Amino acid sequence: MADTFAVDAPAAEAGFDAAAVAELNRRFEGAGTRRLIETMLAEQAGRRVALVSSFGANSVVLLHLVAGIDPSLPVLFIDTGKLFADTNPYREELTRRLGLTDVRVVGPDPDATARRDPHGALWITDKNACCAMRKVEPLAAALAGFDVWLSGRKRYQGGSRADLPLFEVDGRRLKVNPLAAWTAGDIDVYRNAFSLPQHPLVARGYRSIGCEPCTTPVATGEDERAGRWRGLTKTECGIHVPDHMGGLP
């Protein structure tokens, strides 16, 4: 049977059908990543598709794959106002180098930020509220015009990502995780094969890069995301938490 991403139109209008998404996972597990992305974009023609990228430690791999297929695909980047100083210049460098033509920088609403975090210290008193205001809500607003979004999450990152599917139902949207089955070694091999630049903080021990106040370097032997919200039970900002994004527009 030929690979396909087709979803019945009536189901797609109301939200992607869970059974059809389960079939996509069965059919494409083990398929090549580039073919998966190419087929998805071809079969979802007419639907609005975006890649969401942090331009973090390993983001360059998926960005490079997408740029080689369709450099005009919208790429959504969240500038929380709390990023490391190196992240935005790195984003600009990759945008130029990969020839991406539609990178959209989104961020928290200035009025909401002034009202809810007037001193810029909400991350100290309520990290979940800070993430909601600076990441979840801005991305939800940016995704309001899209039907399908791609993320760069991988199973080897552990935690809630250990059983990550290639395709998920995310509210009314289809969420695609093309690199779900990739290992850390796969990432290194691909990046080296194409001489792709790493985020400058990787050389300083940061293996997962988020907002500066809530990210620390990772020691040898620690999990890749051990430096995110170190010492807390919190492991995700909220944009990848089931029903978090699904409950927003």
Image: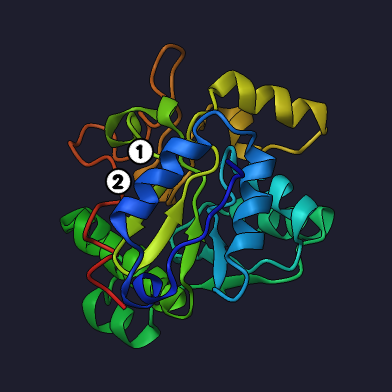
Q: Camera-side residue: 25 or 240?
A: 25
73 horizontally vs 235: left or right: right
Residue 194 vertical position relative to residue 50 in the rendered view, above or below: above
Q: Camera-side residue: 42 or 54?
A: 42
Q: CA distance from mark 1 to mark 2?
A: 8 Å
Q: Secondary structure at mark 1?
A: loop
Mark whose residue sits in front, 1 or 2: 2
Q: Which residue is denoted by mark 2 in the rendering?
A: 236
Q: Which residue is denoted by mark 1 in the rendering?
A: 228
Tell me the tag on residue 246. none
Figure quadrant of the C terminus: bottom left
Residue 142 vertical position relative to residue 232 in the rendered view, above or below: below
Say if residue 25 shows up in the picture. yes
Q: Residue at x 24, y 53 (%)?
A: 242
Say if residue 168 shows up in the picture. no
Q: Looking at the image, which residue sits at the far top?
A: 221
Residue 189 falls in image quadrant: top right
**Amino acid type of the residue that numbered disc 1 sits on in the rendered structure:** Arg
**Amino acid type of the residue that numbered disc 2 sits on in the rendered structure:** Glu
Residue 135 drawn at (x, y percent): 37, 64
Q: Camera-side residue: 54 or 142?
A: 142
Q: Residues within 10 Å of mark 1 (few under 14, many from 20)?
A: many
43 horizontally vs 142: left or right: right
Residue 156 drawn at (x, y percent): 43, 25
Tell me which label, 1 or 2, sits earlier in the chain: 1
Q: Residue at x 19, y 36 (%)?
A: 232
Q: Secondary structure at mark 2?
A: loop
Residue 48 vertical position relative to residue 124 in the rendered view, above or below: below
Residue 104 falls in image quadrant: bottom right
Q: Camera-side residue: 107 or 189?
A: 189
Residue 179 drawn at (x, y percent): 54, 37
